[in-house]
């Protein structure tokens, strides 16, 4: 390979990296412009290509009937999903990584099956079930469904995280007088905590973003996605864009927070 | 505590939870789908499949999956191989490329709406360049091709990231020695990609494709934001049966049809990309 083809190859490589970054960022930037422009500008033509830093659209969003409640509901549901999916899923992840037991294959199959199923569809019969039990249109009911969505991920992710911690560490703790429980809380837990936080955040994002089940299961207590979806036909453009922006912001922060664990999460979970 | 029972105790909460909120509602939805006029029947299925919108929404969903998934796969493979070669700024680039992972389909639909709507950025740019005199209403029934393109672009933009993450994780598991050996024997980068990366990446490719294809059949909110009723898809019809037509049986039948399609494609992908027994890294 001579120097000329090598340098043109490098140029091509850099150019495509930049292009792919722009492909991700430019649409986000355009949404930002719309969010930080006054409602008049958002509905006018042609559009400016830089934001005018007017908070009109955002304050319209905040003042829109029911919007802040929907935002609060979204946060509540996502927080409940986060706690429940880790509390229920992490023990199973630990069991999968540390024990060989009869039925392990079947259990893994059940988990994978859940992942291979269009889960939001289950919201339809659950709606009936929730009406019978009084859970209909409640934040907790929806959180239960979102937990079902997040659980396969939390089991597989924690499985992969626990597998990354050598069992020898635990065994050493046992020989030094720890019980299974204290070995877990004193040795494994501190090592695993950042990873667990990352997968909890992942569960939060799954719930925060879910649209279908949220729209099916809530009527009065809409979450933000359900609220936006319901008002898609009727709401003005600046409301849609401000709403979309509010939906995006946590995603940006959360992906940044978990970026180190994203790949560890998927590494072993694949096998 | 007997160590023999400990693993079962640990998986008990998940198993109970999934039985209650996954298996049980699944049985309910199946029951509801096969139940009509006071008895077991296929009436719900006949009703939904004979509706004039069914072939259209079925075709749209399939076309969209066929257009979107291969592009995402190619793009994700390209990005993943580019990232592995990267020395500087790898973390930053990966962060940027995985941002859409956290963005919901609804938000993605709204983002691309900002570009394609009548007073949107595409029109602003085109009129700035003098290509059009008046803003064109792209997302209308006169431009079915552009509606399709907008939805496909939004999907590709949003959901390539999940494939990228799975593939980058998978490539990370391939031992470097294989590449070094191949280089010693003079294999070109392309040869190394097709002879080492692709075959060893099979489990990850399987996961990524299964996940993506299933989600592609569930496409809903992106379409609702961009196409509305212009572009009917299976999941949107299910929603309409449940809410606009208040026909739970039909909605359940639609749900089972989507499930059947998902399972069929999952099996095809698993079979096509199966890992030969004993051939692990």
Image: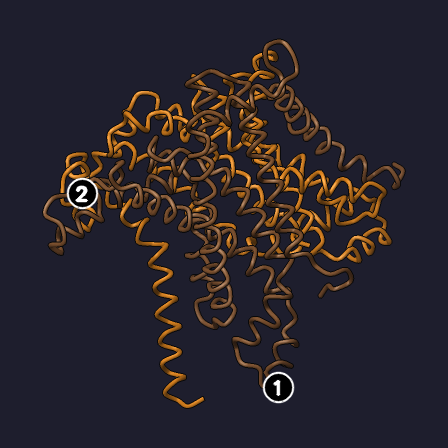
Chain colours: A orange, B brown
Which mark identifies residue B170?
none
| Dot placed on the residue nearer the N-terminal end, 1 or 2 | 2
Q: Would you say B56 lies left or right of A234 here? A: right
Of B66 and A232, nearer the camera is B66
Mark 1 surroundings: few (<14), some (14-19) or many (≥20) residues within 10 A:
few
Name the spot of residue B216 as percent of width and height, x first: 49, 43
Left/right placement of residue A200 relative to residue A30 reads right
Q: Residue tagged by mark 1?
A: B184
Query: Taking B64 as reference, is B82 above or below it?
Result: below
Alpha-carbon span between mark 1 and mark 2: 57 Å
Q: Residue at left 63%, top 60%?
A: B202
Quadrant location of residue B46? Answer: top right
Q: Residue at x 37, y 25 (%)?
A: A230
Count every numbered label the image shows and give the total.
2
Q: Which chain does the numbered disc 1 sit on?
A: B
Residue at the extreme bottom: A2
Q: Quadrant of the N terminus of chain B?
A: top right
Question: Which residue in the structure is indicated by mark 2?
Answer: B136
Q: Secondary structure at mark 2?
A: loop
Say which quarter of the image contains residue B230. Answer: top left
**Quarter holding the C terminus of chain B?**
bottom right
SS of the residue under disc 1? helix
* Residue closest to the eye, A95 or B244: B244
Coordinates of residue B220 in the picture (x, y in percent): 44, 35
Residue closest to the eye, B29 or A219: B29
Q: Is residue A165 above or below residue B12?
A: below
User: Of all residues shown, which one is farthest toward the top?
Assistant: B38
- Residue that appears at 34% across and 37% down: A244
| Residue depicted at x 53% and y 28% | B254
């Amino acid at each position: 390979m001579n120097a000329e083809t090598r340098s043109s190859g490098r140029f091509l490589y850099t150019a495509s990296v930049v292009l792919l970054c722009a492909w991700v960022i430019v649409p986000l930037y355009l949404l930002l412009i719309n969010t930080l422009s006054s409602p008049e500008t958002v509905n006018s033509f042609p559009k400016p290509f830089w934001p005018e830093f007017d908070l009109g659209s955002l304050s319209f969003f905040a003042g829109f009937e029911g919007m802040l409640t929907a935002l609060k509901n979204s946060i509540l549901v996502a927080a409940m999903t986060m706690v429940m999916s880790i509390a229920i899923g992490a023990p199973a992840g630990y069991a999968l990584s540390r024990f060989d037991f009869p039925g392990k294959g079947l259990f893994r199959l059940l988990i994978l099956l859940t992942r291979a199923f269009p889960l939001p569809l289950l919201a339809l019969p659950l709606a009936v079930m929730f009406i019978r039990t009084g859970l209909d249109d409640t934040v907790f009911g929806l959180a239960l469904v979102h937990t079902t969505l997040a659980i396969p991920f939390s089991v597989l992710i924690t499985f992969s995280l626990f597998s990354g911690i050598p069992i020898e560490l635990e065994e050493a703790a046992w020989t030094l007088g720890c019980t299974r429980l204290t070995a877990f809380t004193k040795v494994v837990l501190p090592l695993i905590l950042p990873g667990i936080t990352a997968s909890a955040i992942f569960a939060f994002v799954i719930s925060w973003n879910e649209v279908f089940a949220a729209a099916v299961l809530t009527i009065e207590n809409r979450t933000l996605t359900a609220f936006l979806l319901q008002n898609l036909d009727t709401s003005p453009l600046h409301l849609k864009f401000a709403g979309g922006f509010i939906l995006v912001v946590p995603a940006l922060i959360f992906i940044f927070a978990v970026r180190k664990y994203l790949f560890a999460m998927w590494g072993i979970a694949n096998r | 505590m007997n160590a023999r029972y400990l693993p079962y105790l640990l998986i008990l909460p998940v198993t109970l939870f999934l039985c209650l909120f996954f298996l049980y509602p699944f049985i309910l939805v199946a029951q509801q789908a096969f139940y009509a006029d006071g008895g077991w029947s296929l009436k719900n299925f006949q009703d939904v499949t004979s509706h004039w919108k069914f072939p259209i929404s079925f075709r749209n969903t399939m076309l969209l999956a066929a257009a979107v998934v291969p592009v995402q796969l190619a793009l994700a493979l390209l990005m993943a191989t580019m990232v592995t070669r990267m020395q500087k700024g790898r973390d930053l680039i990966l962060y940027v490329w995985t941002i859409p992972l956290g963005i919901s389909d609804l938000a993605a639909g709204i983002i691309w709406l900002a570009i394609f709507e009548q007073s949107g950025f595409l029109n602003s740019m085109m009129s700035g360049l003098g290509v059009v005199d008046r803003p064109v209403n792209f997302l209308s029934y006169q431009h079915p091709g552009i509606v399709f393109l907008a939805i496909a672009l939004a999907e590709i933009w949003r959901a390539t990231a999940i494939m990228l993450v799975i593939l980058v994780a998978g490539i990370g598991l391939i031992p470097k020695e294989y590449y070094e050996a191949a280089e010693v024997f003079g294999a070109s980068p392309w040869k190394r990609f097709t002879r080492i990366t692709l075959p060893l990446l099979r489990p990850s490719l399987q996961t990524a494709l299964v996940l993506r294809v299933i989600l592609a059949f569930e496409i809903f909110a992106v379409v609702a934001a961009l196409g509305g009723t212009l572009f009917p898809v299976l999941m949107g019809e299910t929603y309409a049966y449940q809410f606009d037509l208040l026909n739970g049986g039909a909605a359940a039948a639609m749900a089972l049809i989507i499930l059947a399609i998902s399972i069929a494609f999952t099996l095809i992908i698993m079979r096509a990309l199966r890992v030969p027994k004993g051939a692990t890294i």
